[in-house]
C-alpha cells in the first residue's frame, strides 16, 4: 500500500512542478484540463492517484506528453536510452516537448550510426597477420 501512496505523491509532485514551470495556477490548469479544482489539488498533494484518462487531460492542459505523466504514474515503463536519455529527461530547464525532440534527434543519430557500422566494417580490410622480420 505504501508503494501506491508513493506513486500518487510522485505524480502529484511532478504535475505541480510542471504547472509551476508553465506558470499556470491550479485554477487555470483545472479549467484547461476539465478537472475540478479540489480534485486536482488532491492529486498534487498525493491524496488521489489519477486515472490514465485524467492524466491525459492534465497533460493536454500542461501541453506536455501524456507519456511523460504515464511514466511518472507508473502506468508505462521508463523508456530506455542510457545516461544521455536519462540526462535529457531529468533536465528541469527543458519543456517536455523540447526533451522529446532532443531524444528523437539523439535516437535518429544512434540508428544512423548503427546502420552505417556494418558497412564500415565490410569496407575496412582485415589487418595483416604479424610477421617476424628476419634479422
Image (spheres, helix red, strand yellow):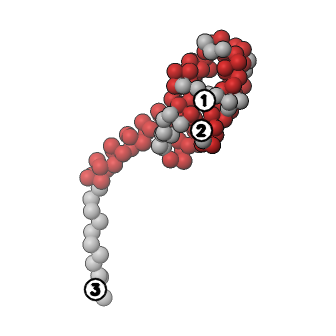
Q: Secondary structure at mark 3?
A: loop
Q: Identify the image quadrant of the N terminus.
A: top right
In depth, the one of 120 and 25 nearer the eye is: 25
Instruction: Answer with left or right where residue 11 lies relative to residue 118.
Output: right
Q: Which quadrant of the structure image shows residue 86? A: top right
- What percent of the width, then of the height, locates residue 54? 56, 21
- What percent of the width, then of the height, locates residue 56? 53, 21
Disc marking residue 134? 3
Q: Secondary structure at mark 1?
A: loop
- Residue at the spot 65% in from the left edge and 11% down from the top edge: 31
Q: Earlier in the sequence, mark 2 or mark 1?
A: 2
Q: Which quadrant of the structure image shows residue 22? A: top right
- C-beta proximity under 8 Å, tags 2 and 1: yes
- Residue at the spot 63% in from the left edge and 43% down from the top edge: 2
Q: Nearer the viewer, mark 3 or mark 1?
A: 1
- Residue at the spot 52% in from the left edge and 21% down from the top edge: 53
Figure check: 101 above or below 118: above
Q: Secondary structure at mark 2?
A: helix
- C-beta proximity under 8 Å, tags 3 and 1: no
Q: Earlier in the sequence, mark 3 or mark 1?
A: 1
Check disc 1 and report the residue beneath it: 49
Check disc 2 and report the residue beneath it: 4
Assess disc 2: are there few (<14), some (14-19) or many (≥20) residues with their C-alpha within 10 Å of its C-alpha. some
- What percent of the width, then of the height, locates residue 69? 56, 29
Disc marking residue 72? none
- Residue at the spot 27% in from the left edge and 62% down from the top edge: 126
Q: Residue furthest bottom?
A: 135
Amino acid at each position: 500500500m505504501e508503494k501506491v501512496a508513493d506513486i500518487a505523491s510522485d505524480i502529484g509532485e511532478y504535475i505541480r512542478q510542471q504547472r509551476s514551470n508553465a506558470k499556470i495556477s491550479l485554477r487555470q490548469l483545472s479549467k484547461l484540463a476539465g478537472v475540478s479544482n479540489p480534485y486536482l489539488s488532491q492529486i498534487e498533494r498525493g491524496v488521489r492517484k489519477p486515472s490514465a484518462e485524467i492524466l491525459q487531460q492534465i497533460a493536454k492542459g500542461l501541453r506536455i506528453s501524456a507519456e511523460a505523466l504515464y511514466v511518472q504514474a507508473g502506468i508505462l515503463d521508463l523508456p530506455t536510452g542510457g545516461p544521455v536519455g536519462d540526462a535529457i529527461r531529468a533536465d528541469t530547464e527543458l519543456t517536455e516537448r523540447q526533451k522529446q525532440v532532443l531524444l528523437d534527434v539523439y535516437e535518429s543519430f544512434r540508428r544512423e550510426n548503427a546502420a552505417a557500422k556494418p558497412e564500415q566494417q565490410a569496407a575496412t580490410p582485415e589487418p595483416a597477420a604479424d610477421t617476424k622480420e628476419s634479422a
